[in-house]
Amino acid sequence: MIERFWRGVLILSVSEEGWKTAEDIREKIEKEFEVPVIHSSYNPKILENYWDCIDLVIFIMALEGSIRISCRFAKSKDKDPAVISIDDRSKFVIPILGGHWGSNDAAEDISRLIGSPAVITTASELQGIPSVERIASFIIAKVENPQELAKVNGAIVRGEKVCLNGIDLNLGDHFIKGDDCKYVISIGKAKGEHVIFLRPLNVAVGIGSKREVNVEGVWKELSARVKEMNIQDRVKVIGSVREEFKEIAHKLKAEFKVFSLEELKGFSSPCITPSGEKLKSLGVPGVSEAIALTLGGKSSRLILRKVKVGNYATLSFATIEGD
Amino acid sequence: MIERFWRGVLILSVSEEGWKTAEDIREKIEKEFEVPVIHSSYNPKILENYWDCIDLVIFIMALEGSIRISCRFAKSKDKDPAVISIDDRSKFVIPILGGHWGSNDAAEDISRLIGSPAVITTASELQGIPSVERIASFIIAKVENPQELAKVNGAIVRGEKVCLNGIDLNLGDHFIKGDDCKYVISIGKAKGEHVIFLRPLNVAVGIGSKREVNVEGVWKELSARVKEMNIQDRVKVIGSVREEFKEIAHKLKAEFKVFSLEELKGFSSPCITPSGEKLKSLGVPGVSEAIALTLGGKSSRLILRKVKVGNYATLSFATIEGD
């Protein structure tokens, strides 16, 4: 499951011992899953920013602390990120929110990485079955009729068969190809009493780079990510502060746009990953995410949080919302 | 720890499987610890009533459900009851709130009773160390200067030495007899920079009984409880619907008052244990608790929730607040 957490993992620690545990977990997740991971000392402001735009929050602290903090941010089963609590000495890996929507699976992944037991308390029959919202995020699509979400998510939780129409994902026995069910999740028209319509979204890419440009290295990483996310035909625009990446845009038949650091100064979004000290001193809130989100339009959302390419470039993807 | 939970244990289940698990746990707790235990299907109204007047809440359901419900009621570390979550199949016993103030110890007690592991995530050095409020409840006393609570509880949590002055409790190495510390919990005058003053409270007793009165049986239970709670000189008034218990009041040098069921009809308090069907049909909200709380005065609080004596009587204790 963690390999699909493209919007990233946020690890929050409080004690010195917890910091070391968190760093160990950060390294292992990054190595195994290649998803963006941010580790920070806990403060409420950070969590407030990230809660709605991150896929997994891991608290490194005693369970009660994790719960009391989560209570301040939790909205509902369908909206909250997956949340896991691990104590400072990593005795237990405990999924606390989003169990059926990813945290149980993620806890088992982490359990395997660090060798501590996962404390799974939900009925195993429903493990790993994703919500409609998560299926939409897997294929990078927008839910066109959210008013049907509760009904179809309800059917999923009850273990009823749900059809996937025009969606090429293998999500286990609960989901059937086609549209011959009472509940359907569909790209395009479909039979079925309750149909969720998903609209695949186009994608904007932002590339950050040091002065010494390595086009080949960035292309390798970018094309691998595009393939993994199955959006080969959907990258419509690429932006960078370096002209040299124009040839990557050509290869993907996408537009290309050059940005100056000056243009990025004004950018702000609560969701973006904190930038390094150097950019901060220039008043620039990060490069690749700021570019991807600017190209994506006003309602654009990050779908691949900033990842590093070697030590010379960064890469981010955002949706194009057409506004 | 559970043996001191005189205000009772509330078990809340949601599923059929959970109901059976809960009944099993209820029986084992009642047998081992002789504390009042209430088991009910979860509904928010019940929890709202009990949250502030019960010592331990046990949720029988998946952890996430327990957390989302607790989020709606949790106030602060010092005010919330101990809270434990156990899944329907009792795979894990997880203290979720009140870890340092009793739920860790209680989880270990239950773990031993049902043979499932307790998931303890707090630093073990602080296990089982009670808060000032809990020490006050152990000796049935009122905190006279609550403005000092945060400071002294802080010292307890930090592991600093705290003095117990005039309080005969063995609470482990962190507490020293006398008043020669910076932080003191005291009955009466004491040195020390920060002193919490506790005032031992007098006690009112309510006795419910079937028509066939068994004074000897009630005396045996009542005197055992009085001894256990160390309030031999503090029972000031006893009430019942049966005259025959007057001789028990004499033995304790307490007043005695006879109540009619009619007098109890008007009584209401959010904290009292739901009464059986027969009393409900008469419009009486319970007998022993209603009497104890009525005798205790307006601000009276239950300190021993209704316990059964055989199948013929009930017994409750409340504080006398003198208003």
Image (cartoon, coloured by chain):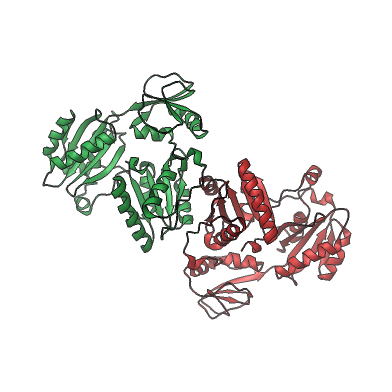
Chain colours: A red, B green
Q: Position of residue B113 (x, y in %)?
A: 36, 52
Front in this rendered view, residue A216 or A265: A216
Name which quarter of the figure residue A295 lies in: bottom right
As drawn, is B313 to the left or to the right of A134? left
Depicted A279 relative to depicted A160: above or below: above
Residue displayed at 32% across by 56% down: B23
Residue A84, x across and y down, in percent = 56, 54
Q: How many tags in the picture?
A: 0
- Specify whether B8 is left or right of A193: left
Rendered-image quadrant of the N terminus of chain A:
bottom right
Image location of residue A318, percent across then percent down? 72, 61
Q: Residue at x 11, y 47 (%)?
A: B211
Quadrant of the rendering where the C terminus of chain A is positioned: bottom right
**Image coordinates for residue A64, horizontal then vertical, percent:** 50, 46
Residues A22 and B52: in front is A22
- Relative side of A190 to A296, left or right: left
In the image: residue A279, left or right of residue B305: right
State the residue at coordinates (85%, 64%).
Answer: A216
Q: Is residue B311 above or below residue B229?
A: below
On the image, which quarter does residue B134 sit in? top left
Q: Nearer the viewer, residue B168 or B308?
A: B168
**Is residue B29 in view?**
yes
